[in-house]
Amino acid sequence: MSLPVAGNWFALERQLALPVTVVHGGHEPSFGRGRLLAVARYYLDHWPS
């Protein structure tokens, strides 16, 4: 996975708090809250310091 641009770090933090049940990401299949949290957490944990 490639990391998103720096301005998206805050958006990833906000996603962790959203009461999301289904994500429709566009060209990929839809996924649930667990996958959203896993992806956001992955990016935040691997953000360059």
Image (cartoon, helix red, strand yellow):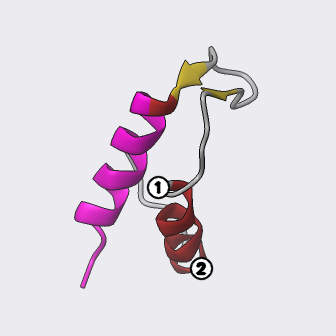
- How far apart are labels 1 and 2 at the CA level? 16 Å
Q: Which residue is mark 1?
A: 16
Image quarter where the C terminus lies is bottom left
- Residue reaching furthest to the top: 29
**Badge 2: few (under 14), some or many (20 or more) residues near its Cα, within 10 Å?**
few
Q: For the point 42% across and 60% down, which residue is it?
A: 3
Q: For the point 60% across and 44% down, which residue is it?
A: 19
Q: Which residue is mark 2?
A: 7
Q: Are marks 1 and 2 in contact (CB under 8 Å)?
A: no
Q: Nearer the viewer, residue 44 or 33?
A: 33
22 is higher (above) or lower (below) than 17: above
Direction from residue 25 to residue 37 in the image, left or right: left
Q: Which residues are magenta?
A: 34-49
**Looking at the picture, which amino acid does disc 2 mark?**
Gly
41 is higher (above) or lower (below) than 6: above
Q: Determine if the magenta segment contains residue 38.
A: yes
Q: Give the quadrant of residue 11.
A: bottom right
Image quarter where the N terminus lies is top left
- Residue reaching furthest to the bottom: 49
- Residue reaching furthest to the right: 26
Front label number (1 vs 2): 1
**Looking at the picture, which amino acid does disc 1 mark?**
Leu
Tell me the SS state at disc 1: loop
Tell me the SS state at disc 2: helix
Q: Which mark is residue 33?
A: none
Please state the horizontal and vertical placement of residue 5, each as a whole percent of the image.
55, 71
Q: For the point 48% across and 38% down, which residue is it?
A: 36
18 is higher (above) or lower (below) than 9: above
